[in-house]
Image: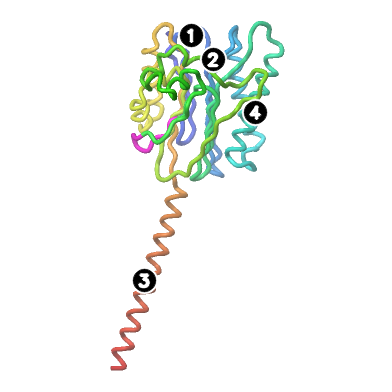
Amino acid sequence: MDKTVDFHAIPRAAGGRAQGGRSTQEDDLICLHDPSSSTWLLVLADGMGGDGAGELASRGVIQATRRLWEQGTWRSLPGPLFLETLCQQAHTELQQRGENLAGAEPHSTIVAVIIRGSRVSWAHVGDSRLYRFQGTRLIGRTEDHSLGQLKLQRGELSESELANDPDQHKLLRGLGGPQAPVVEHGFAELDGDQTFALCSDGVWERLTTEELASLSQRRDQHQALQEALAMAVERGGQDGDNVALIFAHASGEGWLRRHWNKLGSAMQRTVVFGRRVAEQTATTDSET
């Protein structure tokens, strides 16, 4: 097993990946930050397709992400529209990469998050996941586009059984292939501090939601990632999957500022009202 962690870090977010029990690394990720606009873009991809196509696919998703970021497309588009554009362009990238391959087809999952101020948007295709935590409480996670997830929704298996169900790896959606992907979106306003975990199936199949929640709260994100990925690789064993994980801390500073301003306005109105009452009382007293 290869436990070596390829580590990436930006302010308030960090990502890492390890090869695990596989002979190649088919997981990839990128963390990008623009301090002037308080914008973060986090993307994780899990490639597949055989004969090196998986590695080619995940790398293609990340290269498409970097290209769009450098073009500044995210500055002019709403978060969900930018993420849709990203997914579709990554899909086209994989189609083009597959044209010169014989006997292999590059396909990939994607989970992507863009944070702007107090607003967060996300998109995903496949079974790489986004977990959102308020403290250690899970407030939401993406639902896999897999046959296993479909069985879970039908009540044919429990959440705890999903990770070990053989149909979990049978994906119903993905990037690459002849058809354009159907991308699933979500968005929210940040209300206070939240943490996010983006991960490939090699991580969420081996770590519990509670473990991810606890690790995501750590101030030392590097140490938290090292511990999380080491646990996933160890539990996966000699034949375990690649593992990739991003932790991010997001603060609803805009939400706090808006509510502080409202509180300040209310207090100011109270002070003005109190002064008026005092003035009226003083006038009444002088007249009497």
User: For mark 2, what is the residue?
Assistant: 26
Check disc 3 and give the amino acid type. Answer: Val
Which segment did they paint magenta? 131-137
Could you tell me residue 174's position as x and y percent?
Answer: 58, 21
Marks 1 and 2 close (CB-CB < 8 Å): yes
From the viewer's perspective, tell me whether residue 95 is left or right of residue 137: right
Of the two numbered discs 2 and 4 in the rendering, the one whose residue sits closer to the viewer = 4
What's the residue at 42%, 34% (across, down)? 140
What is the CA distance from the residue labelled 4 to the residue labelled 1?
Answer: 28 Å
Could you tell me residue 191's position as x and y percent?
Answer: 42, 45
User: Helix, strand, or loop for circle 1?
Assistant: loop
Label total for image: 4
Marks 3 and 4 close (CB-CB < 8 Å): no
Name the disc covering residue 88, or none.
4
User: Helix, strand, or loop for circle 3?
Assistant: helix
Pick whichever of labels 4 and 1 is earlier in the sequence: 1
Check disc 4 and give the amino acid type. Answer: Gln
User: Helix, strand, or loop for circle 4?
Assistant: helix
Marks 2 and 4 close (CB-CB < 8 Å): no
Dot 2 alpha-carbon crowd within 10 angstroms: few under 14, some 14 to 19, many 20 or more: many
Could you tell me residue 68's position as x and y percent?
Answer: 64, 32
What's the residue at 63%, 8% (across, down)? 104
User: For mark 3, what is the residue?
Assistant: 271
Task: Pick the quarter of the image with the C terminus.
Answer: bottom left
Pick whichever of labels 1 and 3 is earlier in the sequence: 1
Quick check: is 135 in the magenta stretch?
yes
What's the residue at 65%, 6% (across, down)? 103
User: For mark 1, what is the residue?
Assistant: 22
